[in-house]
Amino acid sequence: MAEMVKKATRESFGLAVTAAAKDNPNIVVLDADLAQATKTAIFKKAYPERFVDVGIAECNMIGIAAGLATCGKIPFAASFAMFSAGRAFEQVRNSVGYPHLNVKIVGSHAGISVGEDGATHQCLEDIALMRTIPGMVVLNPADHYEMMAAVRAVVDYNGPCYIRLGRLPVESINNNDDYHFEIGKGITLRDGKDITVVATGLMVTEAVKAADALKAEEISVRVLDIHTIKPLDKELIIKAAKETGKIVTVEEHNVIGGLGEAVCSALCESYPAPVIRMGTQDCFGHSGPGAELLKEFGLCADGIAKTVKQVLGK
């Protein structure tokens, strides 16, 4: 088993893209004056000739990335999710999505765990925005090992991708030797028969903690790690619905347009089953310590366990 580490996925991204660039000279990185925060500074230090800081100009950054992709480069365009997915949405849609260019959009500091930066920077809509763009792959890795694998996968994938990064350090849960990452395929981290928790990103670790705690109360919880929200692993989710009957989804994102709605869409078309969606409930966040905000919004192990017991009537 690989070493357990506690690292923010933004830092894992910086390490992963730098490692991938060693063997692939076409990888370039663009940033919008946030290299220290997005951790692209790691890449900049190793490959300064392949790094471009466009300044505070995300829309221009996406346009430059699109141009580089037409020349055979593999650009990673990074900024806070609020800006790379939000401010630059038109450029991502029209200059990257429509021509289906090989650009990797990177959204760091996503979700309310951004903390003290407040509601204006706590992007809770990026997954929804990126899901709507035809052909866009949407990834939200859970930990260090998953982020490292995800970056390798998108380098090999020829097409537009969105990668979501978190600010808070997170304990690794995918450090098993048999861990296998494949775009569009979820991972069963805990088996269970009473209910399934479908989680993504930072919430996966919390879902595992909740399942382990509930096991002591003889509640058997299946936990699915959905690192790829689009294309969604419908087969795995439908199988879970058939075998456990009830589903709880949990994401650090608005329940509108995110993982929960993707799961609901998959089930309603093939195997309708009850789904409770955990996330922010159509509201903005506010300033505060990231870990405390997650607890306030119920996006923690205790909150997940409480919801599971409510659904099961226990």
Image (spheres, rainbow, N blue to C red):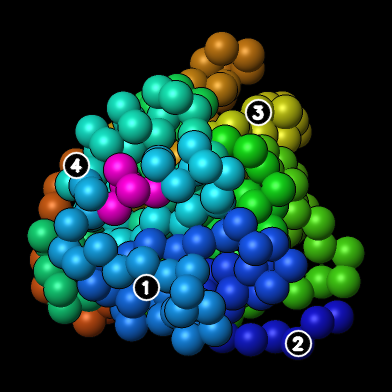
Left or right: 95, with 285 as reference point: right
Residue 234: which numbered mark, if any? 3
In this rendering, the answer to whether 145 lies above or below 250 is below
Kind of residue sitting beneath label 2 = Glu
Instruction: Give the labeled residue for mark 1.
Output: 38
Tell me the chief SS of the magenta region: helix
For label 2, the SS is loop
Query: Which residue, given by chain and number where applicable, does mark 2 sit on?
Result: 3
Q: CA distance from mark 4 to mark 3?
A: 25 Å
Q: Check the image and name the residue furthest to the top.
A: 269
> Contact, CB < 8 Å: mark 1 with mark 3?
no
Q: Which residues are magenta?
A: 61-65
Q: What secondary structure is found at the residue carrying circle 1?
A: helix
With 10 as the anchor, is 145 left or right in this view?
right
- Say whether residue 135 is visible: yes
- Which residue is found at the position 69% from the left and 62% from the top? 24
Q: Mark 3 or 2 closer to N-term?
A: 2
